[in-house]
Amino acid sequence: MVFKREEIRFMIERDGSAKGIVFSQFKSFLDLMNYSLDKSGINCLKLVGSMTMSARDDAMRKFTVDPNYKIILMSLKAGGVALNLTVASHVFLMDPCWNPAVERQAQDRIHRIGQYNPIRTMRFLIENTVEEWILKLQEEKELVFEGFCGGSRKINGERLEILREEIRFMIERDGSAKGIVFSQFKSFLDLMNYSLDKSGINCLKLVGSMTMSARDDAIRSFTVDPNYKIILMSLKAGGVALNLAVASHVRKLLPCGELRKLCCLCYRSDKSSVSQDPPCNGSHLWHLSLSLHFLLVLPSGHKSSTLPQRILKLQAKKELVFEG
């Protein structure tokens, strides 16, 4: 508690207009900090989950417009998302959360459009306590995330570049060909959409957050408009109950336990063009192993390739069970 007060004093002495947000997962700890700061003559506000919406709005408004309030105390869940607090430039994390994404979300409350001041984030940890174990857990979760969706820019860039080359090859080989690109992550689909648009490739998108009418429009445009060669789909929103026989290529950038569902989308009974390609076991999709696996298995030197390879082994086991 003493260290926190000293840090806040240093913030105010360095910049009299600076404001800060103090995050904690425990309401009782926020109450202690509120009492301690009040005793030190530092005006502060509080935002926790038990407050009504009007009380939260009042706290936010006072913190934003009143220069006397330098600190707002927030619970990590109540104030960690959906707030724009660019009036603040300092974040104090009082205790680590087992999920590092939650902490990043909290820090992003001040790192938003409209922020023109340098940002300072400080974490408070106690040595030789469970907090050190939580930090190790955070590191493990980061490795899992990078291994599953290629968290590094280099790996994402490699996937996008391979995807662009594959799509160019598809169009050069058959100008009327169309393809479906699947990913389990909407953010990755957004990256692909931007990348393909920059490359001059017209594409559509179908994700779970779209309305039914918007989904129908995307499917109809992809089916009848020859200018749209690619449709980007989230695996859950577009992985079942669609007939996309107009497409002949499937690109899947990340592995998943269910492989056969994707093949069935464009291998339908009314599919006539698939006979032009040599048949594959169980599916007539063009180069199924290349289309579905080439984009997601990286060289073994990458740490992030381990989890996708494990999922591919799981796919192989599920295929054996299916065939049996």
Image (cartoon, grey):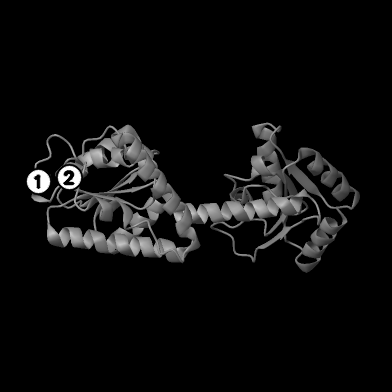
Q: Is residue 148 visible?
A: yes
Classify 118 as above or below 142: below
Counting every numbered tag in the picture gives 2
Q: Nearer the viewer, residue 288 or 35?
A: 288
How far across and how far down the image is residue 274, in percent? 12, 46
- The CA span between labels 2 and 1 is 8 Å
How far across and how far down the image is residue 82, in percent? 57, 44
Task: Give the class, few, some or many, for how many residues have Cα within 10 Å of label 2's Cα (few <14, many ≥20).
Answer: many
Could you say whether the residue bearing mark 2 is in a helix, strand or loop?
A: loop
Residue at (33, 64) in percent of width and height: 161
Residue corresponding to mark 1? 275
Classify 291 as above or below 155: above
- Residue 222 as seen in the image, left or right of residue 317: left
Classify 198 as above or below 261: below
Residue at (15, 43) in percent of width and height: 224
Identity of the residue furthest to the right in this view: 39
Instruction: Kindly identify the amino acid type of the residue bearing the numbered disc 1.
Output: Ser
Residue corresponding to mark 2? 284
Indicate which disc, 2 or 1, sits on the residue closer to the N terminus.
1
Q: Mark on residue 60?
A: none
Residue at (81, 55) in percent of width and height: 128
Quadrant for residue 78, please give it.
top right
How far across and how far down the image is residue 178, in percent? 19, 50
Q: Quadrant of the C terminus?
A: top left
Cβ atoms under marks 2 and 1 closer than 8 Å: yes
Could you say whether the residue bearing mark 1 is in a helix, strand or loop?
A: helix
